[in-house]
Structure formats: structure tokens, C-alpha cells
């Protein structure tokens, strides 16, 4: 079976939302805001794209949302079959930036899928333009051999459990769940957290990543310094290692 279709089953969107129309690459080539280098990426690295679902107040019975910063009158779900995973982040970033509305992209490459979201706010360049604020992407998932946490994540995307306050909250909820899956690098169990708990967890996750990068740098540096400096660096490495373990325990508690 088509792995995109298998992935879509987890959403369980109403039939009214279904579109299933091919998106032609020319749509992006005609966009004057896209650089020629981005055109080449789409032409060479994207096999095909489909518009899967259209979420609007009429199709999913969720109100739109507009304020001074955000405009969420619709949410689109599309698929993009990519030739390589190596250029996936660049391509998904280009696609998100080219579409002036909130989009969830289900990327497919070499039999694996990845979900991509990008929170967008109004651009100062014009009312019809949106600026990508934060982009989140899952690791590549094998839909036929999911881990326990990956299965829990996909099941959490069912419309039954998502926020229906308005389209902004609905999209933000999906994006938050995408980001929560990344925490399973250090957490034993995938779990849905509230907004405040999520932000605390995300800050801890980002801090761990920051400290791990620093730790790698210190371990490289220690090879090229004097013995006295090696002693100092070893103390710092041990301290940093303990701090990382403390943050990981908090994240997994």
C-alpha cells in the first residue's frame, strides 16, 4: 500500500477535507519570490507533490483565527516525494516559504516518511505574505516498522485529540506534537504535554543539545593543549557531563 495513504489514516480527517490533487512544479516556478536556485532544487529533487487535505471552517468545523501577528484561515496538508533525504531540509524549507498559508508536509523518500510543520506569521512585506517563524521536522519513519513512541506520536495526530479552539491552535497543536517526538531521543516514553510543560521540555532539550555540542568541542580541544590545561578541561568535561545527565533525568521524569 502507498505509505502516504497509510500515514494519512492516522489523521482521520473528515471526508469533506479530502482533495487528492496533483500539485504541478510550475506552481512554484511561477512564484517570483522563489530564487532560481530553489527552482533547481524542486526540479531536480522533488519527484511529485499532492494536495491531500484542505482544512477550513467549512470542511472541518473549526473557526479561523486572525490577529495582528497571525492569520490562520486554512490549513493545507500536502505530500512531497523526494529523491534524496540529504537535501530534504532545504527542499521542505523552500516549499514552506513558497506557500502563503499554514502547511503540514508529509515528505516521502526511499520508503520512509517525515512530517514537517512551519509556524508562520504575517509579513511586513504585505498582507498576502507570511513569514516562516519556526520549522519542525520528525526523523524519517518507517510506517511499516514503527517504534512504540513513533506509533504513539502518529496516533496522537488523530483529530479526536487535537485542539479545535481555532485553526491556529489546531496547527500549533500538530506542530507541538511533531516537536515532542524529538524529545524521545532522551525520553523513554512519548507523551502529550500542555503548552507550559512543552515549552519547559523544549528548553531543556535545546539546552542538552547546546551542552553536547560544547562537550564535543572540549574533547577535541583537549588534544592540543598543555598538560595543565588538560587537567582544567577534564574538570570542565566531567562537570558538563554531570549537568547533561541531570537535564536528561528531568526531561524523562
Image (cartoon, rainbow, N blue to C red):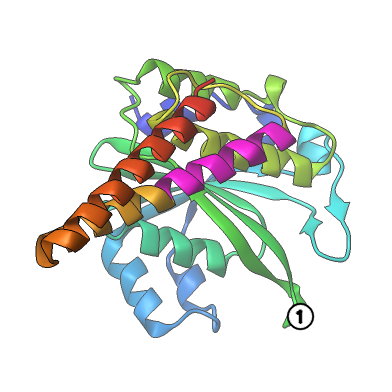
Q: Tell me the residue at 72%/83% (across/down).
A: 125
In this figure, which residue is indicated by the disc labeled 1?
126
User: Which secondary structure type mostly characterizes the magenta part of the structure?
Assistant: helix
Asked if residue 160 shows in the view, the reply is yes
Quadrant (top left/top right/bottom left/bottom right) for the N terminus: top left
Please determine whether, in this image, residue 188 is positioned above or below residue 137: above
Asked if residue 9 shows in the view, the reply is no
Q: Tell me the residue at 87%/42% (across/down).
A: 63
Lateral position of residue 251 relative to residue 218, left or right: right
Please determine whether, in this image, residue 148 is positioned above or below residue 197: above
Please determine whether, in this image, residue 162 is positioned above or below residue 212: above
User: Where does residue 189 sit, x and y in percent of width and height?
Assistant: 47, 18
Q: Tell me the residue at 26%/56% (across/down).
A: 232
Provide the secondary structure element on which disc 1 rests: strand
User: Where does residue 32 sit, x and y in percent of width and height?
Assistant: 54, 84
Q: Nearer the viewer, residue 175 or 203?
A: 203
Q: Give the range drawn in magenta.
A: 196-209
Q: Which of 1 and 145 is in front in this view?
A: 145
Lateral position of residue 82 relative to residue 77, left or right: left
Amino acid at each position: 500500500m502507498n505509505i502516504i495513504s497509510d500515514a494519512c489514516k492516522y489523521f482521520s480527517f473528515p471526508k469533506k477535507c479530502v482533495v487528492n490533487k496533483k500539485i504541478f512544479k510550475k506552481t512554484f516556478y511561477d512564484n517570483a519570490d522563489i530564487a532560481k536556485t530553489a527552482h533547481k532544487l524542486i526540479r531536480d529533487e522533488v519527484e511529485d507533490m499532492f494536495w491531500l487535505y484542505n482544512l477550513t471552517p467549512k470542511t472541518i468545523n473549526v473557526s479561523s483565527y486572525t490577529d495582528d501577528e497571525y492569520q490562520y484561515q486554512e490549513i493545507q496538508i500536502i505530500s512531497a516525494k523526494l529523491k534524496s533525504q540529504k537535501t530534504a531540509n532545504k527542499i521542505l524549507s523552500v516549499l514552506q516559504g513558497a506557500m502563503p498559508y499554514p502547511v503540514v508536509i508529509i515528505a516521502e523518500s526511499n520508503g520512509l516518511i517525515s512530517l514537517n510543520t512551519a509556524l508562520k506569521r504575517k509579513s511586513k512585506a504585505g498582507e498576502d505574505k507570511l513569514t516562516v517563524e519556526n520549522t519542525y521536522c520528525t526523523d524519517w519513519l518507517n510506517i511499516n516498522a514503527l517504534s512504540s513512541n513513533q506509533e504513539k506520536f502518529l496516533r496522537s495526530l488523530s483529530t479526536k485529540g487535537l485542539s479545535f479552539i481555532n485553526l491556529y491552535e489546531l496547527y500549533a497543536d500538530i506542530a507541538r506534537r511533531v516537536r515532542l517526538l524529538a524529545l524521545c531521543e532522551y525520553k523513554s516514553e512519548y507523551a502529550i504535554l500542555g503548552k507550559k510543560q512543552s515549552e519547559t521540555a523544549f528548553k531543556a532539550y535545546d539546552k542538552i543539545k547546546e551542552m553536547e555540542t560544547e562537550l564535543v568541542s572540549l574533547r577535541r580541544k583537549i588534544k592540543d593543549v598543555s598538560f595543565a590545561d588538560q587537567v582544567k578541561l577534564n574538570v570542565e568535561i566531567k562537570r558538563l557531563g554531570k549537568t547533561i545527565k541531570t537535564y536528561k533525568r528531568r526531561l524523562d521524569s
